[in-house]
Amino acid sequence: MLESVTSRALESALDGLSMRQKAIANNIANINTPGYTAERVSFEDALAKSVQQGNGATTATMSRSLEPTREDGNNVNLDTETLSNTTTVLQYQFATQAENQVLTSIRAALKDG
């Protein structure tokens, strides 16, 4: 398939958002696990830098939250996870729609060409 900065960036974004969805699900599943610290996925800054450099490809990274913990050592906050989940779902839908637009444009170019 034709590789462009846009298609690589969208693929990287979808991979990062998918990883974030899994982390959120894991955090919620462990909300009552003593000593568990929430997972955080980041990729946006690296993705922006990669796009600026003309590449678009990057890999998401996972780290542990440094937010304060409860007495049991757990720091998962359901409100934070719910908000993050909503945002991630919307971003994933937007990126999927953008990817579909890229593919539609490629198909149209191949058909007309």
Image (cartoon, helix red, strand yellow):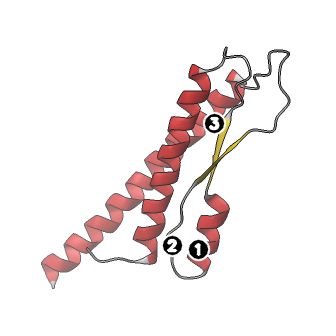
Q: Earlier in the sequence, mark 3 or mark 2?
A: 2
For label 3, the crowd category at 10 Å Cα-Cα, with few meaning under 14, some 14 to 19 and many 20 or more, is some
Tell me residue 28's x, y (percent).
60, 23
- In the picture, measured across the screen, residue 40 lies left or right of residue 18, that is right
The N terminus - image quarter: bottom left
**Residue type, numbered disc 2:** Gly
Residue drawn at point x = 81 percent, y = 39 percent: 66
Task: For mark 3, give the secondary structure.
Answer: helix
Tell me residue 76's x, y (percent).
71, 25
Say which of 30 and 43 sits in front.
Answer: 30
Q: Which mark is residue 36?
A: none
For label 1, the crowd category at 10 Å Cα-Cα, with few meaning under 14, some 14 to 19 and many 20 or more, is some
Q: CA distance from mark 1 to mark 2?
A: 5 Å
- Labels 1 & 2 near each other (Cβ < 8 A): yes
Residue drawn at point x = 74 percent, y = 22 percent: 35
- Residue topped by disc 1: 50
Residue drawn at point x = 67 percent, y = 63 percent: 45
* Quarter residue 30 falls in: top right
Q: Nearer the viewer, mark 3 or mark 1?
A: 1
Q: CA distance from mark 3 to mark 1?
A: 24 Å
Residue drawn at point x = 63 percent, y = 66 percent: 46
- Residue topped by disc 2: 56
- Residue topped by disc 3: 84
**Residue type, numbered disc 3:** Ser
